[in-house]
Image (cartoon, helix red, strand yellow):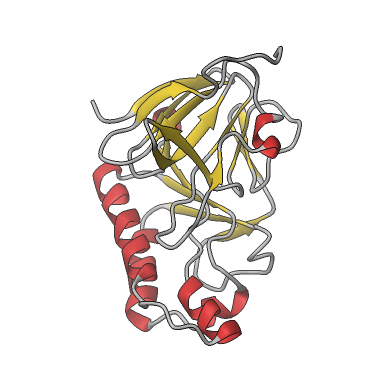
Amino acid sequence: MNEHDFTLADTQCRALPSGALFLPAHGLLCVSDLHLGKSDRIARRSGVMLPPYEVRQTLEKLQSDVHAISPKMVICIGDSFDDLQAIDSLHDDMRLLLTGLQAGREWIWIEGNHDPGPVDLGGTHLAELTVGTLCFRHIATAQSGEVSGHYHPKHRVTGRSRPAFIYDKARVVLPAYGAYTGGLSSDAPVLDQLFDKNAIAVLTGHKAVATPLRKFPQRAS
């Protein structure tokens, strides 16, 4: 089995190797920080040209997850686009791909710090959303039972760092799903203060691999 199952606020969750989160009981697939159009934004603001393949790579990965799972609902929890201009620069074939992914299911865009405005690409745009016992938002707060992103966590094991989920009994922070996204080390103070001493990191890749977030936990929960 390539996924990692865990329970958050009495809800069964499944961390997928791709970096997506699946809630079987709700038929819900959640992804964070696609940052579509990042190469376009960098070119506009700095003149640095990057290979323009990140949108296709990210959406084709999402397409693979959607086809494999056939979710009833997809929630993109913020920073789906690198900025609002990136939405306008999407090529027609990528818009068509998105339209196909949305067909026959509920699609929710949660606002992030990069894309706070309305998204004219189908679906519903919200600040946050509660489904069952879980609240989906872009940036973690003190609320228990929340699913968030924003920090692009990465965890290092045996010298190699990979995008990772981090979760404990109160919350889960998803890795960045986008192809051109960087990452924040899992031991960064802003992440450390979010999680208790028993937190788990789930590395993404060919297989979702769970490991303790802290090798020698010192801080009380």
> Does residue 134 appear left or right of residue 121 in this picture?
right
Asked if 150 appears above or below 157 in the picture, the reply is below
Quarter of the image for residue 144 reads top right
Q: Is residue 23 visible?
A: no
Residue drawn at x 37%, y 30% is 158
Residue 219 place in picture, x, y as percent: 70, 15
Q: Is residue 217 visible?
A: yes
Residue drawn at x 55%, y 21% is 214
Asked whether 127 or 173 is in front, the reply is 173
> Does residue 211 appear left or right of residue 134 in this picture?
left
Which quarter of the image is occupied by the N terminus? top left
Residue placed farthest to the right in the image? 142
Residue drawn at x 60%, y 15% is 217
Residue drawn at x 64%, y 23% is 170
Residue 112 place in picture, x, y as percent: 65, 57
> Does residue 220 appear left or right of residue 77 in this picture?
right
Asked if 32 appears above or below 28 in the picture, the reply is below
Residue 66 place in picture, x, y as percent: 32, 50
Residue 97 place in picture, x, y as percent: 33, 69
Which quarter of the image is occupied by the C terminus? top right
Number of marks present in the image shown: 0
